[in-house]
Structure formats: structure tokens, C-alpha cells
Image (cartoon, rainbow, N blue to C red):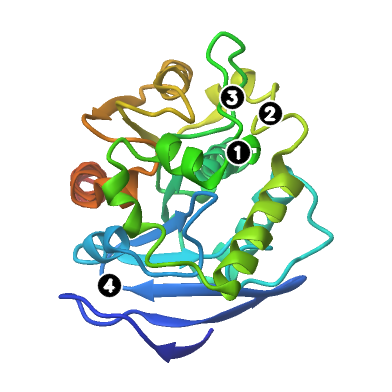
Amino acid sequence: MTTSETGQGVSGPPTEGFLEVPGGRVHMFRGGDGAPVLFLHAAGGAGRWHEFHELLSRRFEVFAPDHPGFGGSDDFPELEGVDDLVFHYLDVIEALGLERPHVVGASFGGWVAAELAVARPDAIGSLTLLGPAGLRLPEHPVADLFLMTPEQVVGALFKDPARATALFPGEPGIDDVLAAYRDMTALARFSWHPFLSNPKLERRLHRITARTLVACPADDRVIPVRHGARYAELIPQARFSQVDDCGHAMYFERPGDFAAVVTEFLAKVEAGTQQSGASR
């Protein structure tokens, strides 16, 4: 991975660069030290190192790639669905030389993470799903952000709209508008039909063997909390948690709270792994 220095934080600046994998280049941030954490981002916020990443990197080595077609990553036009993204991220894990990394996915990235854990349960050390998409629950429909005005999108994503500056800093320029359009185009490519879901996923979740945390914002107006609870019901021995007073843009609105929940879980997984290795 070729890198250039960028960012700031207590744990030292992350590196920013590109990773060559089959099909193109992946734009990625990497920071911190410790057990590896692969973070799969939501539909928004690609291409940046956020406070949430920084907080996780104080305990772990965080790898934060942009999905194909998002942020600074290449388009990877041959990838057509989330099943293709599963194999893409297996290539990323292999190219980085990671052995059973902790995988943390948010919203759309949570769906990708769940599908990865289903397809290759042996390839990951643990699974954390933050407000995950991917399930089809007709009685609890997912909001369609594509049909909303920018003001409605902010209202749907944040319980406190004043926190929206964490995701939408300042007045958007033409480059920001074009980047957002590209991200939404990529999201549509991977999740338009069926919309943000895989009807087959529910019956496959029993294949997940990694220790799993499902954490949801209590005031999610995009993906109802019931989706996260359903994941936790179907994944063997999964733990379910909620963070109060927070909307769907969880790691932007309450980065400290979500980082604390994730860090606590991953630390327990690491302690259990070390104890198991010592007893052999």
C-alpha cells in the first residue's frame, strides 16, 4: 500500500494511500496500533478519517477503506452486487496480510460485513454491526433517502440536526456535490433491487461463528432498530446493544459512545482469544 501522511490525533496521524487489488485501487486510511480492525463504512462519509476512527485507533490498528465507487476508490465496474463486495473484501484482507481481523460495519457497510461473515466465517476474528442494513422486514420498512430533499435527509439521519456538521462540514462546493452524487450512484448500483436488502440473508445468518455485537442508535429513522434486533436474534450468541439519544448517522452524531461500545466488545474478544491461546 502506497501512503502519504494525513490526519491528526492522540494515537498519531493515520496514513492515507491506495491498495492494489484485482480490479483496481482501493483508497484507504490506516491508523493506530494493536489487533487489526477492518471498518466498512456507511453510505455517507467515505474518503475521510473521522473522530470515530481516531477513537478506535487508540486501542486497535484501524483499516478504513472506501467501498468501490465511493470516496477515492476506483469504480470497479465489474462489481454489481453485495455478493461481489464480499469477494472484494476477501481480496482486501489478503492484500493487507490480515489474519482474522475484527470486522466492524455500519449501515450499508454492516450489511456487507454480515454477508462476509456468512460466506467466510473462518476469515474474521469478530463481527460488529452498527445499525446494519441488509434484512427485509416489511413491517419495519427502511427509509428511502433517494426520495428525500437534503433537509429531509439531515432530519432522517440525525436526531440532533446540529450534529450534522460532522458529516456535512460547511457549505458544499461543486466537488462535494459531485462526490456525494458518485457515492449515491454506487449505493444504488449495489442495493437498488432488492432495496438495501438480501431476502436470503436471514436464513443464512446461522452460519456466522464469530463473536458478534449488534449496536443500534435508539432513534434510528432510516433503518428501524428492529432490524438490528433481528440480526441479534438470528446470529448465534450475538449481543445486542442500543445507544440512546442518537439517530442513524451514529458514528457521526455520537462517536464517543459508539467507539466506547465497540472498543469494550473488541477488548473482551481479544482477552478471550489470548486466554484461549495461553491455555493450549
Query: Which of the pair 153/49 is nearer the observer?
Result: 153
Tell me the SS state at disc 4: loop
Mark 4 or mark 3, earlier in chain: 4
Residue type highlighted by circle 3: Leu
Q: Nearer the viewer, mark 1 or mark 2?
A: 2
Q: Please give the name of the residue rendered at 32% of the width and 27% of the height, measured from the top-left corner.
A: 219
Q: Position of residue 183 (x, y in %)?
A: 63, 58
Q: Which label sits on residue 115?
A: 1
Give the residue number, with chain letter if any, for mark 2: 198
Residue shown at 42% from the left, 25% from the top = 228
Task: State whether residue 240 is above or below residue 83.
Answer: above
Task: Give the residue at mark 3.
Answer: 135
Horizontal relation, residue 77 to residue 111: left or right:
right
**Front-most of residues 180 and 74:** 180
Answer whether labels 4 and 3 touch (C-beta < 8 Å): no
Count residues near mark 4 (Cα–Cα under 10 Å), then give few for <14, some for 14-19, many for 20+.
many
Q: Amino acid at mark 2?
A: Asn
Among the two numbered marks 1 and 2 on one chain, the one whose residue lies closer to the N terminus:
1
Q: Residue 204 got which mark?
A: none
Q: Amino acid at mark 4?
A: Gly
Provide the residue designation for mark 4.
32
Query: Residue 77: image x %, image y %?
Result: 82, 62
